[in-house]
Amino acid sequence: MERNQSKICVDSIWILSLFAAFPLSQSFDYGEALSKSLLYFESQRSGHLPYNQRVTWRDHSGLNDGLEQGVDLVGGYYDAGDNVKFGLPMAFTITMLSWGVIEYGRQIAGAGEYDHALEAIKWGTDYFIKAHTHPNVLWSEVGDGDTDHYCWQRPEDMTTSRRAYKVDENNPGSDVAGETAAAMAAASIVFRETNPHYAHLLLHHAQQLFDFGDKYRGKYDESVKVAKGHYTSVSGYMDELLWAALWLYKATKDEVYLKYALENAHGLGGITWAITEFSWDVKYAGLQVLASMLLLGGKHKNHSSILEQYRSKAEYYLCACLNKNNETNVKLTPGGLLFIRQWNNMQYVSTAAFLLTIYSDYLQNSNQRLKCDLGTLDPQELFNFAKSQVDYILGNNPMAMSYLVGYGSRYPQRVHHRGSSIESYKKNKGFIGCTQGYDIWYNNKGPNPNVVVGAIVGGPDSNDQFKDERANFMQTEACTYNTATLVGVFAKLHRWKEDDLFTNQSLISSS
C-alpha cells in the first residue's frame, strides 16, 4: 500500500512537471479576448446609439447621413480611426463576423457572448438594408477620406462632408455589391433560427444585390472615385462575385448559385489565382476554402473535379502560411508573425488564423491531412500555427506587447483613432473644431483618454518592432476587419483551453 501511494505521488509529480515544461498556452484568457473583441464594435458604431450601449465614451453621431441625397443612411460602422463609412470593408467585416458565428456559434454562446455577436452583425446588416434602396442601387460610402483626413474630430462633432455615394446601373460596383450580398447571405444563416423573418429579408436583399452586381459589372472605385486611395479595389470584382455566389448557395442550397461558382471558376479566377493573402479586397483564398469545405461528406461528388481545383488553390494558400511551399511562402518575422506588408499587417494575420483554424477542423472532421510540397501536416499542426499567431497578437512576441487594445498589462496607448484620442463627448460637450483636434489632441504625446477596447492595431514591422505613436498610423490604426476575423477563433481557443484544462485536471486527479 505504501509502495502504491508512493508511485501515485511520483506519477503526479511527473505529470505536473511535464505540464510545467510544456505549457498548453501562455496563460492567455481567450474568453476575455473574445468579450473585448465584440466590445470593440460598439466603439465603431455610427448613428443613434442604443440604450444598452456599453462603450460609454461614445455618443450619437452621423444622424443626418444621407439627408442631402434624400435617403436614410443613419447607422453602420466607421471602418477605423476616421469617420467615413466605407461600404466594402464594412461588408467584409460583417461577412467574417457571420462566418465566425456560423462555425463557432456554440463556443461563442458557451462564453456568454452570443447575443453580443448577433448585435454586432445586426448593426451592420440593418444599415445594409437601408443602403440598398432599389434592386439596382446600393449606397456604398458616406463621407470621403480626403475631406475627413483633413480634420481630427470626434464623430460627434463632425463638420466634414457627409455626402453619400452610390453604385447603380450606370455606375456599377460589382465588388461592393457582391461583398454586401455575401455579408447578408452569411448573416441570414446566423439569424435563421432566432429571427427567421429577418433572415428571409436579408436573403432577399442578398439575392437582388448579387443579380445587380453580376448583371452590371464594374469596379466600384471607378464609379465612386472618392474611394480610390482609401479602399481601392485592386483585385477587381471577380472574386466578390464568386464569393457571393458561394455564400448564397450556403444560405439557400439553390443549385443555381453553386452552378455559377463552378461554371465561372476559371473565368472569374477562382481556380486560376493562387494567392498568399486574404483580405477585405482579395477574397480568393477565402472563397477557395469555402468551396473546398463543400467536399466534406461526399455531398458534391458530381462536382468534385472543379471543387478539387478550388481545394488545390486553397491549400496553396494554407501551405504558404505554414512555409511548406517549394517557392512562394508568406514571410515570417523573427518572432514568428506572418508578414505580408507594412501597412496594417495584422489584418492578414487575423484572416490567416481564421482560415487555418476552420480548415484544421475540416481536415479533422474528414479524417484528412494537408499535403504541401515540403511535407504533410495533420490538423493539429494547422491549429497550433493559428494559435501561435493569436498568441503573438495577445503578447507572446519580442515586444511583450498585446496588440489587442485593452487586453493584458501592456498594449498600445496612442491608437490612431479620432474618438479615442479626444476627450469624450460625454465629459466635454464643447465643440472641437476641425484643426483644433490636431492642435490639442493629435499632437499630444500622452496616452489616449479613451481606450478603444478590443481593437487590433496594425501591428509591428518585419523585425517585430512597434512604435506606439498616434502619428504612426501604419502600425497604430485599428480596423473593424482586423478584429472581426478573430471573434470565432477566440471562441474556439477559449473552448479548447477549457477542454484541455478539464482533461489535464482529470488526468492528474486520476493519477
Image (cartoon, rainbow, N blue to C red):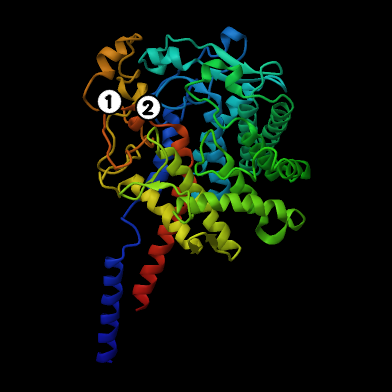
* Residue picked out by circle 2: 56
* Residue picked out by circle 1: 449
The quadrant in which the C terminus is found is bottom left
- At a point 31% along the width and 55% down the height, the residue shown is 27
Asked whether the viewer can see residue 123, the reply is yes
Sort mark 2 into few (<14), some (14-19) or many (20+) by Cα contacts within 10 Å. Answer: few
- At a point 65% along the width and 46% down the height, the residue shown is 271
- At a point 42% along the width and 40% down the height, the residue shown is 340
Task: Determine whether, in the image, residue 466 is placed left or right of residue 174.
Answer: left
Q: Is residue 420 above or below residue 411?
A: above
Task: State the SS at label 2.
Answer: loop
Q: Position of residue 392 (x, y in %)?
A: 34, 48
Task: State the SS at label 1.
Answer: loop
The quadrant in which the N terminus is found is bottom left
Query: What amino acid type should be assigned to the residue bearing mark 2?
Result: Thr
**Foreground pick, 171 / 366:** 171
Asked whether the viewer can see residue 294, the reply is no
